[in-house]
Each structure stands twice: as C-alpha cells, then as structure tokens.
Image (tube, rainbow, N blue to C red):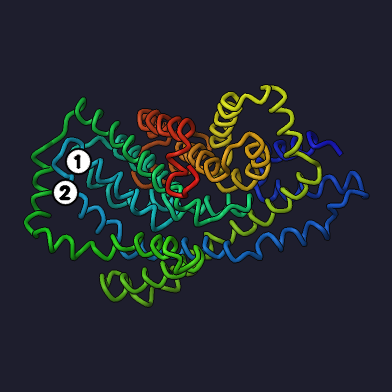
Amino acid sequence: MSAGLVLVVFFVLLALSVPIFGALGITSVFPSLLNPSFSANGIFLVREMLGGINSFPLLAIVMFILSGIIMSRGGVSRKLFNFFCYFLGEIPAGMPCCVIVTCLFYGAISGSAPATVAAVGSMTIPVLIELGYEKPFSTALVVVAGGLGVIIPPSIPFVLYCMATGESVGDLFIAGILPGFLIAFCLMGYAIYYCKRKGEDKQKIREVVGGLRTKGFFQVLKDSIWALFTPVIILGSIYSGIASPTEAAVLSVIYALIISIFVYRTLKISELMNIFVEAINTYAPMLFLIAAANGFARVLTLLRVPQTVSETILTTFGGNKAAILLVINLFLLVVGMLIDLGPAVLILAPIFAPMMTELGVDLIHFGIIMVVNLAIGFVTPPVGVNLYVGSRLSGVPVVTIAKNAVGFLLLFAVALALLVIFPEISLVLVGRA
C-alpha cells in the first residue's frame, strides 16, 4: 500500500470539507479496504483509538478547559487588566501593552488561544475603543496576543505534542516560559511603534489610570492578587514536584471555583451546570479528534511514513540542519493556515520527531518551534480561529483584522526566528541547553 496514496486520500477529504476527525478515520481504514492482509484492520484501529484516549495526561486538557471557562465567567481577566494598567497605563502604548501582558497571564490559566481571545477581548476591546484606539487595531492586538495562550504554560497543544512524542509535559511547560515572554516583548515593541506613529489620547488614558490609582495600590492588589496567584499555583505545583500536570490541572479547577464563588463572588453555584456543559461541548469533539489521530498515526507508522519523510528530506538537503529546519518551519507556517493547531500537532509530530532526533534537535526545542509556528496560523486565513473569535467580538471583518495584524505577525516571526537560531532560549530552564 502506497503511503503517498494514503496522504492524497486524506488531503482530498479535507478539500471536500470532511471534518478532520472523519478524514483521519476514513483514511486510517482505507489501506485495509484495499489490502485485507494489511495489519491495521478495523478491530486494530478501534483498539488503537480507544487506547489513545485512555491516557492520564489527557485528563489535564479537560481540566484546563474547565478552569479557563470558570475563570472567564468569574471575570478574572478584568482583575488582571486593572492590575497591569495601574503600572503600565501611562507609558507609551501602555494600554495595548497591558492587553498583551493580560493575554500572557490569562494564557497561563486557560492554555487555549481562542479562549484567551474571548475572555480578554470581550473586556479589553471596548476599553481600547473608548480610549480612542482604532477598532481594527484593537481587535488585531487581542487576536495576535491571544496566541500566547498556547505558548505560555500550561498549554493544551503542549500536552498533545507530548502525547504524540513521549516527551515530558512538565519539561515542555517549563521550556515554554521564556519563549512566551520573548514573543510578548516583541508584540509590545510593535505596539509602541504603532502608537508613537499614530498617537494616543493621553487625557482619556490618564482618566482611566487615575481612577485606578485613586483606589490606591493596595486596593488594586487586593482585587487582583487572587487572579495573579493562579498561574503561580498551577505552575508552581508542577515545577516543585508537588503535583503532576494532570493533578495541577485539577488543582486549577478547585482554585478557580474557590476564588470565583467565595472570594470574588462573581459566579453563582447555580451557573456551574452550564459551565460543565460548555466544558464537555468543548472537550468532546477534541476526544474524537485525538482518537482518530492516534489511529491515523499508527497507520502512518506501519506504512513507514515517518522514516520515508525523514530519509527523503535528509537525502534532498544532504543532512544540512539549517536548510532542513528552514523548510520545516515554512511547511508548518503553511499548515497552520490550513489546519487547526491541535490536529496539526497530532498528525505531524510523530512524522517529524524521528528526523529531528537524527539531526540532533532536542524534541523539547522542536515542540516549542512547532507550536509557535502553528500558533501563527491562529491569525492567518482561511482557518485562523482567533480571527473569527475577534470578528465576532468586535464586528470587524476577518480580512480587515488580518491586514491590521500583519505588523504584529512580523514581530511574532522575528521571535520565532530567534527561537530556532538560539535553542538555549527554550532549553535553558529545562537544563538541556
């Protein structure tokens, strides 16, 4: 059975708008239909699919989704934004920078880029517009900064990558910290450039920041400290060895419930059922996708696709590490425009991992490179999930948001280039630099 034919079938199904999990499932069965002696028959695939979702680390995803929804309903993003505005509000591009830092911190709660855009954007886009910033710029800012939600730990795509490659979730979480901050600083650099060129309404900004400073630092800190502690508790419990990533995800749910219901009192117990239903509706399609991707990956392995791809690329470029990394980065950028991040990670990580190992590229470093590449796809048509979330929040057309996001994406790409060239940025905290 030709591996090339299998991949052609898969991409044809995608082109026909078959849902990704359906395309994966159909393609996985296809070889055994053409060749009954092929080992991956229907029973084998069902066993592999069920085995793929019978995973303890996988529980972390649903817990982080649930925690993010609770925090969103509990108004945590507003608390974070006010705290950062108190310090940064009056510097050049201070308010846009506050949005970026809020996305950074909220990403450490939700682990999801679209969730970060929805939670932070619904609150900050109206504020920025009221302060005189253009609506397309304000939306583009949140849409791109929301991509930090999958780079700063805890990150749902990081969990998926580790499931596909066997790497440590905790190590990849640690490795994502410096890249997340690097990208945030790059985005702030463009925001400062843009605001200096376009100008800002300093009087309106002073009124907003002045209102916060009238409350006093300790009152603002009191309002936001529980929200600020959220990533500390989640990540601290992992890095200190107190809890595994899955156990830390459960702790994040408990903490989110406590501060939203009993501390901030922004959430009622009667609302919990709707929150649980929303979390299930978000997670259930992901389970089908993970199961189908696991079966598909197994078929590709039996067809020796990872080895074939590795041998072809290595032979074509003569083992030139820099050239191969450049080609793979360009490929991932294109894939990010066409396929959502989760499926892309599940499909491509098992294919590229053996080649990266042969080239001497640390798989933790490659995990960062892959997720950052694909995160850019959140803001690039036609898939661009963040674009559609931002458009729904602001009413700005998707194409207009994408045009205004170009400057931010260029700086995002600069950060990506630095991460590829200097693996120490990703590996120093893990002790592999």
Q: Residues within 10 Å of mark 1 (few under 14, many from 20)?
A: many
At horizontal 70% and vertical 50% (from top left) the residue drawn is 22
Q: Quadrant of residue 91?
A: top left
Which x, y percent locates residue 385?
48, 43
Q: As displayed, is residue 247 above or below residue 46? A: below
Kindly identify the amino acid type of the residue bearing the numbered disc 2. Phe
- In this view, the residue farthest toward the left is 214
User: Pointer 2: what residue?
Assistant: 87
In terms of sequence position, does the residue under pointer 2 or pointer 1 come before the other? 2
Q: Position of residue 277 (x, y in %)?
A: 49, 68
Taking the view exactly as shown, the residue that stands out farthest to the right is 37
Q: Which percent across, then down, holds residue 129?
A: 23, 41
Circle 1 SS class? helix
Seen from the viewer's position, the closer of residues 135 and 157 is 157
Q: Residue sitting at 41 percent across and 67 percent down?
A: 252
The tally of labels here is 2
Q: Give how far across and how far down residue 393 sits, in percent.
A: 36, 47
Q: Mark 1 — residue?
A: 94
Seen from the viewer's position, the closer of residues 20 and 40 is: 40
| Mark 2 Cα-neighbour bin, 10 Å: few <14, some 14–19, many ≥20 | some
Residue 200 is left or right of residue 5, and the answer is left
Left or right of 418, for residue 36 = right
Q: For the point 65% across and 62% down, which residue is it?
A: 53
Pick the front one: 104 or 75: 104
Amino acid type of disc 1?
A: Gly
In front: mark 2 or mark 1? Answer: 2
The quadrant in which residue 218 appears is bottom left
For the residues labelled 2 and 1, the Cα–Cα distance comes to: 9 Å
| Relative side of 29 to 196, left or right | right
What is the secondary structure assignment of the residue under circle 2? helix
Q: Quadrant of the N terminus?
A: top right
